Image (cartoon, rainbow, N blue to C red):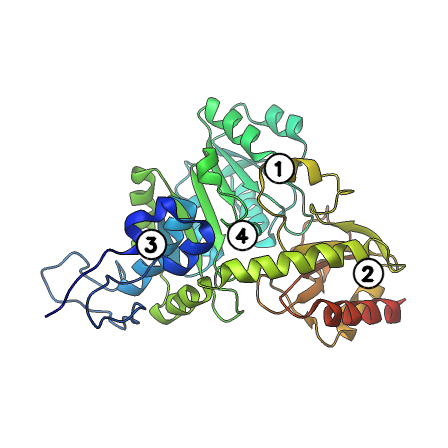
Amino acid sequence: MSTTSASPEDSFETLSLQSRVVAAGRPERTSDAGVNVPIELNSTFLAPGPTGYGRYGNKSWSALESAIEALECGSTLVFSSGIAAISSLFSILPRGAVITASQNGYSGTMVLLGQAEASGAAEVRYVDVSNTEQVLAALPGSTLLWLESPTNPALEVADMPRLIAAAKGQNIGVAVDNTFATPLVQQPLEMGADVVVHSLTKYISGHSDVILGSISTKDQALYQRLSDVRKINGAIPGPFEVWLALRGLRTLGVRMERAQKNALEIATRLSLHPAVDRVRYPGLPTDPHHEIAKSFMKGFGAVISFDHAGGAQAADRACAASLLVAHATSLGGVESLWERRHRWSTESPTIPTNLIRLSVGIEDLEDLWSDIDKALLGSL
């Protein structure tokens, strides 16, 4: 005879976020049940039933969505990629919408904004999100405030509590890309934002082996609209990918703790390095965004950007010379990655051509530093 005990999800309000990443999205506790949700490889479901068809739902999706809900405190939908999630959100904006957005941000988002502007689908007001007064001045008449903080790859920090409150006071929607920070560092929905978006490819999954995205919201009507968009447009995730992401999520707390500790020390050392002109990392007390970040963030993330003193070609030489740090485009994995961002034509023109983005992983600190130091010195 099977017995059922209480699930950790019954009391998530009392758990820390570090415990939630381990406990959330688990199956019901019954006798001899597995502790993990199995991979559901079904496209077809018998009638009658709530799912109906494989494009409408999947138990593997639901488990990951439940786990993210416990972290972001909002109903969650998982998408086939981060850019699919962002595209779905932008698709429900009315034609002619006014979007106030960062002038620096994830290049995929910047391309989407540029396309919307060029087609006449939207008016985009580009702002420096770290300049609070500039953002406030741009808000009147906006349909959506799109915030990315810290920004990719400039590491600018927006005064999110103040900006979100100002936007909501004018009945303006607020969406936040929380990929860099993760919900362990900041929870925009709890600050009053309408939507939080993640590239789950990055820190949530954490192992550079899946491409996924998510949207979370407290607004049930908005959630339903976005769910319908996912169903009709087909930007659905695969069950194996979401299973991998949920497995990766289990170690998010320890990964972020180690990566952030490494990042602060490496940023400190880079600020004294002869091959570096400028370090961008809000965890440094000398960083212009440090005080704002410290006022509401629970950490500073594990991405560093810095300007190579030797210029763009020297930056390329450094990235190509490393042995431990991988020369690749992505971030948030257990391994450290770096690249000169302007090797991509879609990078924002406001980003210096000699800027290197470094995603700090969980390797031994001294091994990492030795590799970075040698690559930088050899590139001069």
The image quadrant that residue 320 belongs to is bottom right
For the question of whether residue 28 can be seen, the reply is yes
Can you identify the residue that label 3 sits on? 66
Q: Name the residue: 23% across, 61% down.
A: 28
- The percent position of residue 182, horizontal first and vertical second, equals 52, 51
The image quadrant that residue 22 belongs to is bottom left
Secondary structure found at label 4: loop
Residue 179: give its label. 4
| Sooner in the amino-acid sequence: mark 4 or mark 1 | 1
| Sooner in the amino-acid sequence: mark 1 or mark 3 | 3
Can you identify the residue that label 1 sits on? 158
Q: CA distance from mark 4 to mark 3?
A: 18 Å
What amino acid is at disc 3? Ser
The image quadrant that residue 224 belongs to is top left
Q: Name the residue: 61% across, 33% down.
A: 159
- The percent position of residue 21, horizontal first and vertical second, equals 43, 57
Residue 312: give its label. 2
Numbered disc in front, either 4 or 3: 3
Mark 1 crowd level (few <14, some 14–19, many ≥20, 10 Å Cα): many
The reply to whether callout 1 and callout 2 are in contact (CB within 8 Å) is no
Q: Name the residue: 29% across, 38% down.
A: 221
| Sooner in the amino-acid sequence: mark 4 or mark 3 | 3
Residue 224: give its label. none
| Sooner in the amino-acid sequence: mark 1 or mark 2 | 1
Q: Name the residue: 15% across, 64% down.
A: 3
State the residue in front, 30 or 147.
Answer: 30
